[in-house]
Amino acid sequence: MSSETRSRRCATWTAISDLRSLGYICDRCIGKDRNFDIIAWNRDSILGLLVRAARTASIRTFQEEIARISTLAQERMTPGSVELWLYHPGGRQRYQILPGGAISIRETGV
């Protein structure tokens, strides 16, 4: 049985659907020691994506994961840009993961 919660699995498939509607090709990553939940690409970019579901729009509970991926970004070991998509009761919040941590991405027209 998977260790992922049902809401997280739903969030992952919702993210895949969202990415496909934006023209990305997506591969879902599986396994206990994976770094990303989804790797997506189009003609212009590659995106490593962490997908999480939470009861609130706060990313505080994911600090360890952000720090781990931030370290990979600092060492230039990521496939392209890296984002965390947080699905919560109010919708979705996107964060770009940079070498120093995460920064909120403001979406326009999505």
Image (cartoon, grey):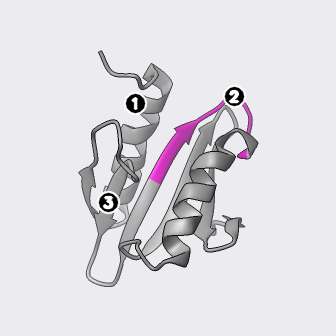
Image disc number at residue 56: none
Mark 1: secondary structure: helix
Residue for point 71% across, 46% down: 59
Mark 2: secondary structure: loop
Discs 1, 2 touching: Cβ within 8 Å: no
What secondary structure predominates along the stretch shown in magenta?
loop
* Eye-nearest disc, 3 or 2: 3
Task: Specify the segment rendered in magenta.
Answer: 50-59
First in sequence, mark 3 or 2: give its number: 3
Image disc number at residue 55: 2
Q: Amino acid at mark 3?
A: Ile
Task: Please tell me whether residue 52 belongs to the stretch shown in magenta.
Answer: yes
Q: Amino acid at mark 2?
A: Arg
Between the C-alphas of marks 1 and 2, the distance is 15 Å
Q: In which quadrant of the rendered image does the N terminus lie?
A: top left
> Label 3: few (<14), some or many (≥20) within 10 Å?
many
Task: Please tell me whether residue 1 belongs to the stretch shown in magenta.
Answer: no
Image disc number at residue 39: 3
Residue for point 32% across, 60% down: 39
**Above or below: residue 68 compared with residue 8:** below
